[in-house]
Image (cartoon, rainbow, N blue to C red):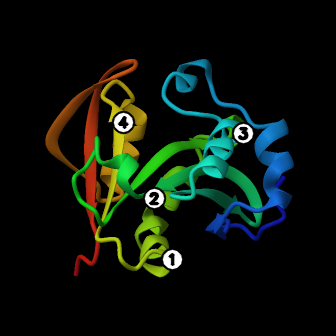
């Protein structure tokens, strides 16, 4: 039973990863077997962030509780995905299995452009690559304003769609 007044939406925030989020993201974090084909769990993604300073681990908080995770990646290592030197790539987005289906990923993606503008003001585009069979995630991204411009590439588990979000839209 929620302690919130009826009709009150939980507060969704994006924050940079901090050590106090480790327990929630490492020990009890899970995704479905189907989702495991498409994303890296936070424990693995954070290890890659520690090895590459162009990768920034981001936590999705709901009422200050970690429920999801993704990585913002920029720099030369994303040139195989986009030629734009001012693009930020979203990687490894997931929501912990018990918290899925509550709209948290959609709300996080709606917060993302402001987060990127605030912390990475030189970026003018957000991009992501998603398996074309991952229809639930495609729907979330399209609702958040990402555009499919027809770019496709072969990925480890089939064809992938490149989605774009142009920053500073008025």
* Number of other residues with Cα within 10 Å of mark 2, as a class: few under 14, some 14 to 19, many 20 or more: many
Query: Do the residues bearing badges 4 and 1 touch, measured as CB atoms within 8 Å?
Result: no
* Number of other residues with Cα within 10 Å of mark 4, as a class: few under 14, some 14 to 19, many 20 or more: many
In three-dimensional space, the C-alpha distance between marks 4 and 2, rounded to whole angstroms, equals 14 Å
In three-dimensional space, the C-alpha distance between marks 3 and 1, rounded to whole angstroms, equals 23 Å
Rendered residue at 74%/66% (across/down): 63
Q: Earlier in the sequence, mark 2 or mark 3?
A: 3
Rendered residue at 29%/59% (across/down): 145
In three-dimensional space, the C-alpha distance between marks 2 and 3, rounded to whole angstroms, equals 21 Å
Q: Which secondary structure lies at badge 3?
A: helix
Q: Which residue is mark 2?
A: 109
Q: Earlier in the sequence, mark 4 or mark 1?
A: 1
Rendered residue at 82%/50% (across/down): 22
Instruction: Indicate which label's residue lies in the foreground, 4 or 2.
Output: 4
Q: Which secondary structure lies at badge 2?
A: helix
Q: Which residue is mark 3?
A: 43
Relative to 101, 91 lies left or right: left
Q: Earlier in the sequence, mark 1 or mark 2?
A: 2
Q: Which residue is mark 1?
A: 119
Instruction: Indicate which label's residue lies in the foreground, 4 or 1.
Output: 1
Q: Earlier in the sequence, mark 4 or mark 3?
A: 3
Q: Which secondary structure lies at badge 4?
A: strand
Q: Which residue is mark 4?
A: 130
């Amino acid at each position: 039973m929620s302690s919130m007044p009826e009709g009150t939406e939980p507060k969704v925030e994006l924050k940079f990863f901090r050590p106090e989020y480790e327990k929630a993201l490492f020990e009890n974090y899970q995704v479905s077997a189907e989702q495991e084909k498409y994303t890296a769990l936070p424990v693995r993604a954070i290890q890659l962030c520690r090895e590459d300073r162009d990768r920034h681990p981001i936590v999705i908080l709901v009422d200050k509780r970690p429920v999801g995770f993704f990585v913002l990646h920029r720099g030369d290592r994303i040139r195989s995905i986009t030629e734009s030197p001012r693009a930020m790539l979203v990687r490894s987005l997931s929501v912990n299995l018990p918290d899925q289906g509550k709209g948290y990923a959609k709300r996080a993606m709606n917060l993302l452009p402001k987060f990127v503008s605030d912390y990475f003001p030189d970026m003018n585009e957000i991009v992501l690559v998603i398996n074309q069979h991952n229809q639930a995630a495609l729907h979330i991204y399209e609702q958040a304003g990402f555009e499919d411009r027809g770019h496709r590439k072969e990925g480890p588990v089939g064809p992938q769609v490149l989605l774009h979000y142009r920053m500073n839209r008025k």
